[in-house]
Image (spheres, rainbow, N blue to C red):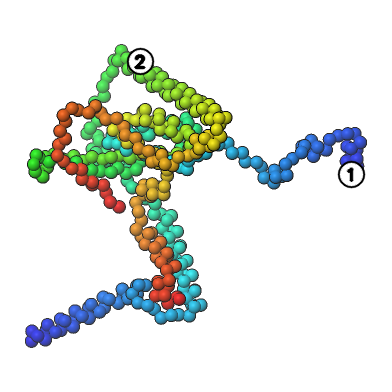
Amino acid sequence: MSLLSNFAKLVIKSQAQFHQSIPSCSSVFMKRQKKIDPEVAKQREARRRKRLEKEIRQMQKHSKKPKPVDELTLDVKSAKNIEERYRPKVEVTIEKIDERAISMKEYTRSRNELQRLDDKWIAGVIASQRKALNELKKLDPKLYESAIQPAPGDLPLIIQGPSLTPPIKNYEAPDGDYIDTTRNW
Amino acid sequence: MLALRVAARRGFASLREIAGEQDASLLYEPKFVDSREFPEYNTINVRIQGYDFGPLEKFQSYIHQTAKRFGFNVVDSYACSAQTHRAITYKPHSTVGEAEMELSVYDRVVRLDAVSAPRLSLLTQILQAHIPVGVTLTVKEHEKADEDYRYIPDLLLKEKQTELKALDDPNVRRNLGWE
């Protein structure tokens, strides 16, 4: 009896496997199809290409989704209870307001001064570069030509910003690791 | 006809005479004058990365302003999604974690156009002088990969594109019975 039931299971199983394999037979890479009439083939190819191109066009229209920039998105959790975290309004005396206004003006002036220095530097450096290149053009046109060409060998150029402190003497770095947790797309 | 004869007798200038001699090549098309002083780079990407995005954004706007002062064209100025790291320190002589910290490296890009070649080094000089603490600045030529990096890759679309490409493959065509 048990032998028979085992046999029955086997039959069912093999049948199930046989049925499963049917859809994958339709794959292009599985089995060579019979050669068909070239006219029909041409028609089919054109139809298929047209369909695919249309689908691709449709998808390209809607598919461009930028990766989310987390620091610029609204934090929903904190936005919900924002009412709880408002601070009481501070009464500011007139002297304080004046003081703040004066310091704000001083700050703006100082920034303006810096910007003016920058602009002066830029104008000066552009003028002197132009002058130098003109001199070079008079001396040696060949050298001038090579001087004004873009130099793709210089790129990519990587500049590191300064560190917060100068190097600390006898600093022993702790034993540790950086594990990359960037989201994979 | 009469008017022409009258004009000729009185010594008036015809329209053609007023206009003067014209270059034949300018008859149908205006002359496009190339105002570029020096050869130019293709599009250039200035990418800044750092752990603090406040100063980073300030610096991004500074790059934008300064590039305009050099006469460059700012095509785009955008934020990319940050790279995140988990920094772990271990206890001495073991692999047991002592402290853990989530760090993100924020990412901003300014894309420049019409960058005249000798001026680029001047821009990088002034940027180097102003770069904030702990910020890395990368100047490179724009590639398509940089643009793609901004977006989530669409697998379905890629699949369709490879399928379309596969139709040119003779093996696939034979299997389909087309050849």
Q: Is residue B54 left or right of residue A46?
A: left
Mark 1 surroundings: few (<14), some (14-19) or many (≥20) residues within 10 A: few
Residue B115 spot, x, y in % from top left: 48, 37
Q: Where is mark 2, residue-wise?
A: A102
SS of the residue at dot 1? loop
Q: In the rendered structure, which amino acid carries the disc numbered 2?
A: Ile
Q: Where is mark 1, residue-wise?
A: B1
Q: How far apart are the two marked residues, 1 and 2, measured between alpha carbons?
A: 81 Å
Image quadrant holding the N terminus of chain A, namely: bottom left
The chain under label 2 reads A
Mark 2 surroundings: few (<14), some (14-19) or many (≥20) residues within 10 A: few
The numbered disc on residue A62 is none
Q: In the rendered structure, which amino acid carries the disc numbered 1?
A: Met
Q: Are marks 1 and 2 on the same chain?
A: no
Could you say which is closer to the camera, residue B23 or residue A35? B23
Residue A35 lies, with reference to residue B65, above or below; the image says below
Q: Quadrant of residue A173?
A: top left
Q: Tell me the residue at 91%/42% (across/down).
A: B2
Q: Tell me the residue at 54%/36% (across/down).
A: A142
